[in-house]
Structures are given as C-alpha cells and as structure tokens.
C-alpha cells in the first residue's frame, strides 16, 4: 500500500467533526518531529468548542531558530524562503449515517475509490503534504527551502479560533511566510486540472425596512415595507457592481431570504427583513459596495434610520496571487506529473486562504477533485492520490532549484 494512502486512511479513521481534531494533528506531529520539525500546539476557543491548531516548522540549513528576538534574524532577506503547507483536520458532520454505504469513519474501498468523511476535504491532501515532505527531505537533507505546516480544526466551523488567530500569532512572533499551499480540493475532473490563485470576498447584509402594520383592507392606514422596498430591489438586481478582471468574474449581489408578515393573510406587515450577500472581486471594496447599495435605497425614497436599518458582516476579503514564483513552481510540477496545463481559478466559496493572504504574499490552493466534498459517501479516486503527493514534492523541488540558482 502506498504510504500516502495509508496515512490518509489513518486520518479518515479518526472522527474529527468540527471543531474536534481527533488527535489527527498529533499523528502528523509524530511524523514530522523526526524530520527536524519543531511542533507547537495552540488551543483556542471556549471549553465546549475547543479548537486545536498545529504550527510545525523546519528551518533550512543555517537558518537561526532563536525566537527571543522575535525571529528577525531568521526572517531576513539573507535567509531561506519559507513554504507553508496549510490545511484543516476537522470535517463537516456526516449527515444521516443510514444513508452512507459504509461507515464514514472506517476507510473503505470500492471500484478504485477511497470512501470516508474527509477523503476529499481534506485529509488526503494532508497525508500527501506529509509524505511529499518526507520524500523531499530524504533526497534533500539540507535544503535551502524552509518548510512549515499550519493545521487547524476550525475551518469547517466558525473559522474564528483557527487559521485566523494563528496568523495573528505568527505575526506577533515575527514569522515571515513567503509561500503557502492550501490543500483545499480544487480540481474538477482530475488532480491538477485546476488550482485556485485567489478567492472572491464575501459580505452579507441584513436590511430591515420599516413600515406600519395594519389591516389589509385599510392600506391607507398602514405602510407596507415590502412595497416600499420593491423599487429598490428592482434597481439592485440590475446594478453592474464591477466588471471583474482577468482573474475574477464580476461582483454579484443576491438576496437569500425575505421575511415579512405575521402569517395572517389580512395583515400588512410592520417590517420586512431582507438578507443578501455580495461575492466580490478585487475591483471592489466593502466600503464601495456598501455605499452604492445605500445610494440606491436613498434614490428610491428610503431614508436611513427613518425607513431602514442596515447591518453588515464581512466574511472575508478577496485575495489574489498573480503568476509568480509559487504559481510557476506548481504549474511546472503539475505539468511534469500529469501533463496537464492547469487552469487558474478564483471561483467557489471562501477558504482559509483569505486569512493567510494577509501575512503571505503568495498563496495558492491545490488539491484533489471536489465533486463529492460534504456529500454522503464522500470519496476520492485512489489513482488521484499519488499524483497529488508528487505534485507537492515536485513543487518543493522546483522552489529549491530556484533558490539554488539565485544563490549562485
């Protein structure tokens, strides 16, 4: 059995529904420590929702490891570049167990596929990270490339006590991240056919339109908030928020819920609540989108506070890694391993890349096909596993070659 497959099975067999880790990170740390990684565990969150995070770093040959000076010397331009493998050990709930063909936490094989919760999202990627690093260091015992792992058990949950707090923690101690590969399942048909070099931002709003409740037979004695909002809604659905760019599609605005009324058919509601969301590109900012939406409301006769209240929640800012050292290294690794010319994409939902991009200039997501993530009978094609591990290893080899060339 391939070592990557075996480790993936070991991880899948450990139930780790968010925010639980199931000792997955300890298993990883035990594999990394003999390779020279210094492994640190950071726990966060309330007692009933405890999140476990792992930071494991292996310094390059000659790099200083003294944190007493906040790592300034270790992170100078004279030192090695640092590549971080980032991911999450938590998984989403299984759903009805009776609908699974086999136990979601007992790795099972059928028709050349490995079944289990986390098979695609993203325990196989973590296994591939580890084995790729083991192989890379066996062939390059003293590389110029520094390596690290950042793992959390709070990606599928609120994402408050995981990568977000770890990025602050790393910043406070002066860590400088040069490259980061997130193991999210980004491929479509075959491992390596698509990677994410960015993600759209997400911002939600809750608009409360105020009216006057009354009898539906006497509309002149009431004020229908749904009717008040209707002209604004007609405009908002036609607004071109931006045109996007070469990497991002245009920003979109969508209503997700409209709530109004008492449930009776003869009562005009006293208020209406509209939930909506922006998925936005780097061509827009939260502030610009907020102002434009308010301008539309005002243009249709609605006045702030008097006629409406508005609450905003920014779930994540957009990030983009333009083609450069990391993108080229990954593209070359995919081409060498699979023969594919990978597609760069920024589609899909949010990921922990949005936090990492704040402290790392080059962040990409690269992982296996995502067709079954979060589904009943989640699985991965076994034939996709070794190529994924080889892509990660060859990416390290490409970055190491670049560092050696620059040194000469």
Image (cartoon, rainbow, N blue to C red):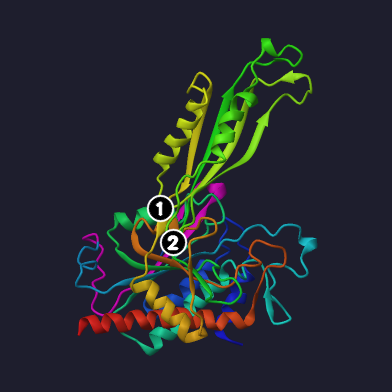
Residue 309: x and y in percent read 51, 26
Q: Residue 282: which disc? A: 1
Q: Image quadrant for the C terminus? A: bottom left
Tell me the number on the disc at residue 168. none
In the rendered picture of this protein, how many numbered marks are placed on residues? 2
Q: Position of residue 343 (x, y in %)?
A: 49, 71
Please, which residue is most extreme toward the bottom here?
139
Q: Image height check: is 312 above or below 298?
A: below
Residue 47 colored magenta? yes
State the image quarter where residue 270 is shown: top right
Q: N-terminal of the two: label 2 or label 1?
A: 2
Looking at the picture, does residue 29 appear above or below residue 158? below
Q: What residue is shown at x 63% (from left), y 81% (from top)?
A: 382
Q: Are marks 2 and 1 in contact (CB under 8 Å)?
A: yes
262, 239: nearer the viewer? 239
The secondary structure type at the circle numbered 2 is loop
Q: Is residue 270 above or below residue 346?
A: above
Query: Which residue corresponds to the image point at 48% horizontal and 27% vertical from the top-left?
Result: 299
State which region is magenta.
42-70
- Does the magenta run of residues contain 14? no
Label ID, residue 247: 2
- The x, y position of residue 242, in whole percent, is 45, 48
If the image is split into quadrants, where does the N terminus sit? bottom right
Query: Residue 137 vs residue 92: left or right?
Result: left
User: Would residue 306 be found to the left or right of residue 111 on screen?
Assistant: left
In front here: 117 or 255? 255
The image shows residue 368 at horizontal and vertical percentages of: 56, 73
Residue 139 in the figure: left or right of residue 212: left
Mark 2 surroundings: few (<14), some (14-19) or many (≥20) residues within 10 A: some
Residue 132 visible within the image = no
> Which residue is rendered at x = 47% and y = 31% of the image?
294
Tell me how far mark 2 sits from mark 1, CA to CA: 9 Å
């Amino acid at each position: 059995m391939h070592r990557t497959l075996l480790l993936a099975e070991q991880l899948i067999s450990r139930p780790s529904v968010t925010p639980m880790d199931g000792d997955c990170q300890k298993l990883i740390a035990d594999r990394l420590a003999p390779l020279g990684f210094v492994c640190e565990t950071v726990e966060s969150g309330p007692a009933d929702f405890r999140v476990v995070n792992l930071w494991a770093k292996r310094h390059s040959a000659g790099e200083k490891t003294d944190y007493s000076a906040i790592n300034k010397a270790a992170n100078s331009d004279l030192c090695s570049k640092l590549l971080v493998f980032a991911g999450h050990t938590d998984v989403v709930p299984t759903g009805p167990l009776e609908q699974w063909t086999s136990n979601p936490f007992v790795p099972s094989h059928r028709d050349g596929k490995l079944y289990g919760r986390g098979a695609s999202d993203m325990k196989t990627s973590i296994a591939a990270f580890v084995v790729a690093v083991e192989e890379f260091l066996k062939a390059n015992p003293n590389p110029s490339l520094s390596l690290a792992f950042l793992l959390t058990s709070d990606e599928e949950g609120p994402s408050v006590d995981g990568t977000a707090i770890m990025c602050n923690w790393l910043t406070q101690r002066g860590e400088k991240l040069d490259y980061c590969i997130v193991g999210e399942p980004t491929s479509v048909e075959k491992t390596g056919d698509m990677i994410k070099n960015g993600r759209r931002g997400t911002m939600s709003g809750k608009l409360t339109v105020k009216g006057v409740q009354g009898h539906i037979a006497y509309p002149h004695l009431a004020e229908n908030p749904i009717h008040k909002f209707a002209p604004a809604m007609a405009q908002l659905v036609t607004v071109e928020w931006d045109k996007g760019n070469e990497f991002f599609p245009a920003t979109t605005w969508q209503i997700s819920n409209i709530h109004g009324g008492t449930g009776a058919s003869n009562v005009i509601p006293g208020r209406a609540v509209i939930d909506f969301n922006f998925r936005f590109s780097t061509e827009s900012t939260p502030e610009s989108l907020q102002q434009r939406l308010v301008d539309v409301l005002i243009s249709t006769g609605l006045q702030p506070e008097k006629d409406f209240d508005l609450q905003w929640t920014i779930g994540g800012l957009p990030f983009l890694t333009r083609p450069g050292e990391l993108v080229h290294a990954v593209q070359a690794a995919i081409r060498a391993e699979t023969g594919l010319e990978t597609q760069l994409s920024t589609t899909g939902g949010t990921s922990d890349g949005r936090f990492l991009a704040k402290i790392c200039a080059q962040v990409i997501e690269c992982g296996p096909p995502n067709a079954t993530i979060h589904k009943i009978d989640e699985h991965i094609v076994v034939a996709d596993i070794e190529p994924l591990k080889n892509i990660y290893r060859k990416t390290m080899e490409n970055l190491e070659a670049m560092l050696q060339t620059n040194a000469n």
